[in-house]
Image (tube, helix red, strand yellow):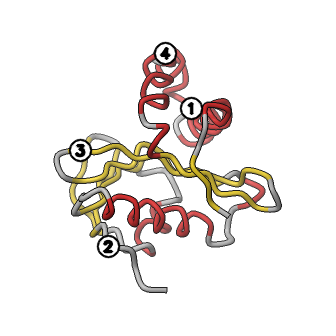
Amino acid sequence: MTRPATGADLPLVEEAERAYVRDVEPGQESAWTAALDRNRALWRANLGRTTVLEVGGAPAGFVMWTPDHGAALVVTVQVLPAFRRRGLGRRLLEECARQAAAAGCGEVRLGVHRDNPARALYEAAGFAPAGEDGAYLLYRRTAVPSAG
């Protein structure tokens, strides 16, 4: 089941983001911590465009996006470790595409660290390479959700 995020979900977002930095970009943890107030402000500002996916009544993941020049820019998509490899990340990305299309966005964009194994998920979910930005690979896809 998916539901809109509430302020009570902000600790979940912060914990998942911190775990990501520790696991995938450990060299950036001190910079991430130094920018925590800015990140918290970003998460609060986009809470209305955040969807939480629950399994058995417990949060299993979430996706957050922000409008960006006619597109939806994925701020973060996370599936908690205990729930990975079940298709939930793809489900969250499809929900993001649905919301983006309903909001008038033509495409969904995201950046992923080149060491992040989630690249395979993005490619399987219809995202195509759109360039590079330092250590990040940029992807985009139409905001129209995939059939099935």
Q: Find out whether the residues at labels 2 and 3 contact each other: C-beta distance under 8 Å.
A: no
Counting residues from the start of the chain, the first of labels 3 and 4 encountered is 4
CA gap between label 3 and label 1 equals 28 Å
Q: Please state if 106 lies on the left or on the right of 40 as rendered.
A: left
Residue hosting label 2? 144
Residue hosting label 3? 68
Q: Residues within 10 Å of mark 1 (few under 14, many from 20)?
A: few
Q: Nearer the viewer, mark 2 or mark 4?
A: 2
Counting residues from the start of the chain, the first of labels 1 and 2 encountered is 1
Q: Find out whether the residues at labels 2 and 4 contact each other: C-beta distance under 8 Å.
A: no
Residue 14: quarter of image: top right
Residue hosting label 4? 37
- Report helix, strand or loop for mark 3: strand
Counting residues from the start of the chain, the first of labels 2 and 3 encountered is 3
Q: Residues within 10 Å of mark 4 (few under 14, many from 20)?
A: few
Residue 21: quarter of image: top right
Q: Position of residue 17 (x, y in %)?
A: 58, 36
Q: Is residue 111 above or below residue 118?
A: above
Mark sitting on residue 26: 1
Q: Is residue 116 above or below residue 122?
A: above
- Report helix, strand or loop for mark 1: helix
Q: Residues within 10 Å of mark 2 (few under 14, many from 20)?
A: some
- Report helix, strand or loop for mark 2: loop
**Which image quarter is the N terminus in?**
bottom right
